[in-house]
Amino acid sequence: MFRWLINNQVWLSRKFDKVLPYKFRVDGNYDFQENIVPACLKENMVVYDVGAGKRPLLNSKVKEQLNLRVVGLDIEQEELEAAPSGSYDEKIEADIAGYRGSIDADLIICQALLEHVRDVESAFQALSSILKPGGLALIFVPNRNALYARINRIIPQSTKATILAALYPKMQSKQGFKAYYNKCTPAEFKALAEQNNLAVINEYYYYNSIYFSFFFPLYLLWRLWVFVFYGIYKEQAAETFTLIVRKY
């Protein structure tokens, strides 16, 4: 009964979304994986998938078709070893904040990682040290300004995990790492990019998330808040965002 009630509220929330302008309905994770990353892939690239661990974004079929060399970099070796066979040509166990690369990457994929890093300044230095001049980094991250991110910083990790498991069991396997959201705003990320010889060549902002869809009245209030926030602060009100940066 509980699961039926939650599913019903989620259905109502998604039904309501259909009347909203398109830009407020786009799923940032989906757009990053299905549109942005594929558009940036070229043959014979050296690609670093940073923080993906057991869930690499590129599969072996794409690797073979484009003759890619994919390096997996993650803070836990166990995560890297749990990835599907053949996902990575090289596995590097390292904390991105303390890692310094070999300037050999044509492309870096960094999805939903930097919100979990305390020292984001050092992480940007690492990304720059991995990229060749002219190489691209695709960075997707939740916005520190989002309401769910503000709540997330207050709720203890164990409590958050319990709540998410009850409300959204499919998300349980994707959680587990504490989020800090340090400097995770569009303005601060663009400043960090510039400080590390990374020019922002494209930026995408998303105003959609599922966190309040378990209770439709609350979802409506959250949607109203997003519209008001956006009207005042524009892209700083995004739920998530992607920056594409090029090393110069």
Image (cartoon, helix red, strand yellow):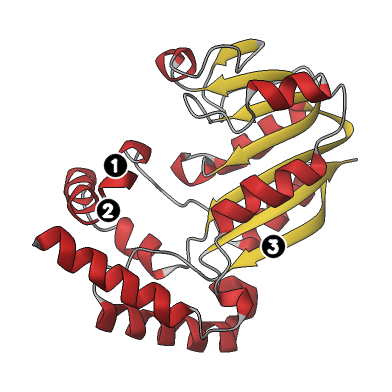
Residue 193 horizontal/vertical position (percent)? 74, 48
Whole-angstrom CA distance, mark 1 to mark 2, is 7 Å
Q: Residue at x 59, y 72 (%)?
A: 236
Secondary structure category for the residue under label 2: loop
Whole-angstrom CA distance, mark 1 to mark 3, is 27 Å
Mark 1 surroundings within 10 Å by alpha-carbon count, few (fewer than 14), some (14 through 19), many (20 or more): some
Q: Residue at x 72, y 43 (%)?
A: 37
149 up-or-down from 196: above or below: below
Q: Residue 78 or 31: which is nearer the viewer?
A: 31
State the mark number for residue 172: 1
Amino acid carrying mark 1 in the image: Gln
Describe residue 41's horizontal placement relative to residue 108 as left or right: right
Residue 198, picture quadrant: top right
Q: Residue 20 or 11: which is nearer the viewer?
A: 11
Whole-angstrom CA distance, mark 3 to mark 2, is 26 Å
> Marks 1 and 2: CB-CB under 8 Å?
yes
Q: Is residue 21 visible?
A: yes
Amino acid carrying mark 2 in the image: Tyr
Q: Which residue is mark 2?
A: 168
> Marks 1 and 3: CB-CB under 8 Å?
no
Q: Residue at x 24, y 70 (%)?
A: 8
Q: Which residue is mark 3?
A: 204
Comes first in the chain, label 1 or label 3: 1
160 up-or-down from 75: above or below: below
